[in-house]
Image (cartoon, rainbow, N blue to C red):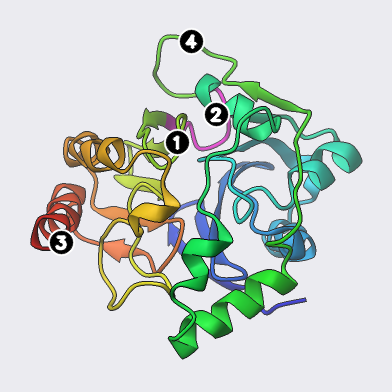
Amino acid sequence: MTRIDAHQVADDVFAFTGTDVNWVILQEGTEVTLIDAGWNGDIQDVERSVRSLGRRPQDLRAVLLTHAHADHTGALNHLHDNYGVPLYMDAAEVPNALGETTESGGPVDVAKLLYRPRVVRWAARITRAGALRHFVFPAAQAFPQRGGGALDLPGRPVPIATHGHTSGHTSYFLPEIGVVISGDALVTAHPTVNGVGPRLLPAFFSHDQHSAIRALSTLQKLDGDVLIPGHGPTWYGPISESADRALDLVIST
């Protein structure tokens, strides 16, 4: 079991870091929503993060997925099979979760970076966490509400289509408190990149990097000032400026 890093980002919004990846819990009374679920090796830490807030896994109304890459899906089957927790995502992401399609970077791309010691250490960590195992998620289903707007779940998250990293990648916006949970559409750090600050992941991680770049314009329009990424620390400041900064890095490379 790894040591999870946890911090409260805003009222009833909590961010957790497992094996080089983040997940988020939104709390509303005695009920909670989980956004993303770490690696398979993070299962017990995901459950422990729920219990750390005085809640039980049975209190989870749903898990919302940003996208169906292995570092965000680890606890999904465990939570559904043991506690009946439903799993929701963009309709375009369901085929990825069901294993009908595969949209992720391959080990060959990572291997090209293994001359860097920190990448070697990261690769070892994620291998232990289940990076070489393949899982499918039969409970995957599209969002129960159509037409946009807030989901009827604790925290009232609003799905924001940020397709590109995968075909159905989704960020989540909490407009009342200005928090954006961006998954891998916008990160602030990763072992395969240098520095800390808003940026895209390397192109080989994405299904369609051109669409991933265009998705930054969607994030630029959100009136928020707290970014909780899928990788890296929480970032404070206007979301529009964070997206601009990431776009500047794309242009400069």
Marked residue nearer the N-terminal end (3 or 1) = 1
CA distance separating discs 3 and 4: 35 Å
Q: What amino acid type should be assigned to the residue bearing mark 4?
A: Arg
> Marks 2 and 1: in contact by CB < 8 Å?
yes
Q: Which residue is the site of mark 3?
A: 249
CA distance separating discs 2 and 3: 27 Å
Mark 2: secondary structure: helix
In the image, which disc is placed on residue 169? 1
Image coords of residue 6 (percent x, y): 56, 70
Is residue 143 inside the magenta stretch?
no
Q: Where does the magenta region start and end?
A: 152-158
- The residue under the point 10% across, 57% down is 248
CA distance separating discs 4 and 2: 15 Å
Q: What amino acid type should be assigned to the residue bearing mark 3?
A: Leu
Residue 199 showing in the rendered view: yes
Q: Which residue is the site of mark 4?
A: 146
Q: Which residue is the site of mark 2?
A: 93
Badge 4 local density, few (<14 within 10 Å), some, or many (20+)?
few
Marked residue nearer the N-terminal end (4 or 2) = 2
Badge 3 local density, few (<14 within 10 Å), some, or many (20+)?
few
